[in-house]
Amino acid sequence: MALAQLHCSYVHLFRREPDEVRRRVDKWIALSKEFGLSPTMVADGRFQLGWALAEEGHAAEGVREMREAIAAIAATGTAIGRQYLLCVLARACGESGEASEGLSLLERALGIARSGAKYQFPELLRAKGDLLLRLNPHDDAAESWLRQALMAARDEGTKSLELRAALSLARLYRAHQREREACDVLAPIYAWFTEGFATRDLVQAKDLLDQLR
């Protein structure tokens, strides 16, 4: 049961729902006190709580928790999914004004992915583009990274990651007065969805499309 709680909380982390992550991880921690958990699972829970803290506006505390959790996971020798944890931490650094540090973390994540661990690879590419834009809104390389993210998600058939990459690319196009391109890249993937319209990505995609039309 504890493992199921942990898995579900990661789903809500991906969907960027900090309240739900905190609720589920709190339940999971209560179960862990009764049944005991491996050090890796304890660190996983700590990582997710750190992410929730950062999302709730406590960036420094959240980033610190995530860093320490990743170090604890690495100390156990567990490598599965580490590139995604680094990506989540990198995004949090970018959102707290530390985009350069975020890029350094993301290079570590991409290095793991290039060695064969392709989990969440499109999201790593998208994060690279977004972080480059945080450092320089006119960085020409950012568009290339976002387009790579979009193509990688399409190749995988992961519609949620395709939507997220398209949303980032559409925002870039809009910022450069390329409204038609923004609409063309975002509208088709948004139209594919038939449910889940209350999730953050779909809400933001609809808002942007409404502004573009």
Image (cartoon, helix red, strand yellow):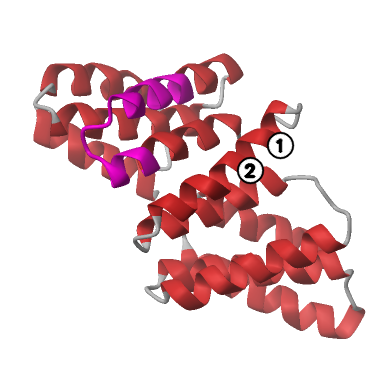
Neighbour class for label 2 at 10 Å: few (<14), some, many (≥20)? some
Q: State the SS at label 1.
A: helix
Horizontal and vertical percent position of residue 44: 72, 64
Q: CA–CA distance between discs 2 and 1?
A: 6 Å
Label 1: few (<14), some (14–19) or many (≥20) C-alpha neighbours in 10 Å:
some
At x 30% / y 39%, what residue is drawn? Answer: 133
123 or 22: nearer the viewer: 123
- The answer to whether one can see residue 69 in this image is yes
Q: Residue at x 74, y 32 (%)?
A: 117
Residue range (magenta)? 131-150
Q: As displayed, is residue 70 above or below residue 78?
A: below
Give the quadrant of residue 55.
bottom left
The location of residue 190, given as percent across then percent down, is 33, 28
Residue 88, image x and y in percent? 54, 52
As drawn, is 145 to the left or to the right of 10? left
Does residue 148 belong to the magenta stretch? yes
Residue placed under numbered mark 1 in the picture: 112
Q: Is residue 26 depicted above or below 55 in this figure?
A: below
SS category of the residue bearing label 2: helix
Q: Is residue 161 left or right of residue 1?
A: left
Does residue 160 show up magenta in the picture? no
User: Relative to residue 89, is residue 57 depicted above or below?
Assistant: below
Q: Amino acid at mark 2?
A: Arg
Q: Which residue is mark 2?
A: 108
